[in-house]
Amino acid sequence: MDVARELSIQLYSLRYLADLEAQLRGLAALGFRRVETIGSHLEDARATRALLDANGMTAPTGHVGLAELRAQPDRVLAQAKTIGIEQLFMPAVPADERDGQPAEFWRGIGLELARLAERFARAGIGLGYHNHHWELAAYPDGSTPLGHLLDASRGSPLTIEADLAWLVRGGADPLAWLERIGDRLTAVHVKDIAPEGQNADEDGWADIGAGVLDWPKLWRASLDHGARWMILEHDKPADPLRFARESRAYLLATVA
């Protein structure tokens, strides 16, 4: 992988920095050429594509909400194609739907996403799931929501975007989950966790390389398991462009 050329960043990390035009301009100045969109960028796909083109950038991946997938899948497909997105990920089941649900609920989500992934695959767009930590809360038998979702969707085109830092926050071994995800892995969120007691104003996240995760090791493992897109993310950076600049510099120095 040509890290300097292919490294991407999730635009959710820059959501508090003015508007999309300013976000893309700032990232382009730092050397980024790829981004991952959030759901709102699909609303005016032509405008999003125009801003990407103007800044010499592409968005091969993007996020889309479950409600949009359920209500208007054909429109989502059309919007994604306009922007140039190759792979969409559903980032989270809404809290009011997921909290306290039994294993059967998560198997149902896996089946629903599998059917959607088949529909999207026929149209030439990938569809996947992005994890957090709540899918790791174990049931009495030791199984987890994420495990049930994966098992129920097995054999379908549904892919996985592994957020390794959320796996760690959920008390899991990210390398073990990469093994379990196997060849369904297509993207990884490259995110870091601050040392205990630090960065409370950033919800305990850190610039990549300033935290506790061994990203050179995790990077190699991610590529070995088939990750095509490595996407920087910080859920609450105090300075979004600092996060982008420092994290990119660290990765170019350690994994390029």
Image (tube, grey):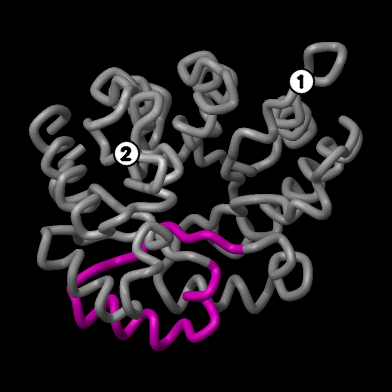
* Above or below, 75 relative to 180: below
Residue drawn at (63%, 43%), measured in percent from left and top? Answer: 157
What residue is rendered at 19% in x and 74% in y?
25
Asked which quadrant contains residue 111, the reply is top right
Q: How far, Cα to Cα, is label 1 from label 2? A: 27 Å
**CB within 8 Å, label 1 to label 2:** no
Which numbered marker is on residue 138? 1
Q: Relative to 122, say whether 233 is above or below.
A: above
Quadrant assignment, res 83: bottom left
| Position in image of residue 129 (x %, y %) | 61, 45
- From which residue to which does the magenta span run? 39-64
Q: Where is residue 112 in the image (x, y as percent from the top left)?
A: 80, 50
Q: Which corner quadrant holds the C terminus?
A: top left
Residue type at the position of mark 2: Ala
136 displayed left or right of 15? right
Q: Residue at x 51, y 41 (%)?
A: 161
Q: Residue at x 34, y 77 (%)?
A: 20
Residue 190 visible to the viewer: no
- Dot 2, crowdedness within 10 Å: few (<14), some or many (≥20)? many
Q: What's the amino acid at mark 1?
A: Ala
The answer to whether 5 is drawn above or below residue 175 in the figure is below
* Residue closest to the eye, 38 or 222: 38
Residue 170, horizontal then vertical, whole percent: 59, 26
The tag on residue 206 is: 2
Task: Please tell me whether residue 116 is drawn above or below residue 15 in the rendered image.
Answer: above
Q: Is mark 2 on a helix, strand or loop?
A: strand
Q: Which of marks 1 and 2 is in front?
A: 2
Q: Mark 1 falls on what kind of element?
A: loop
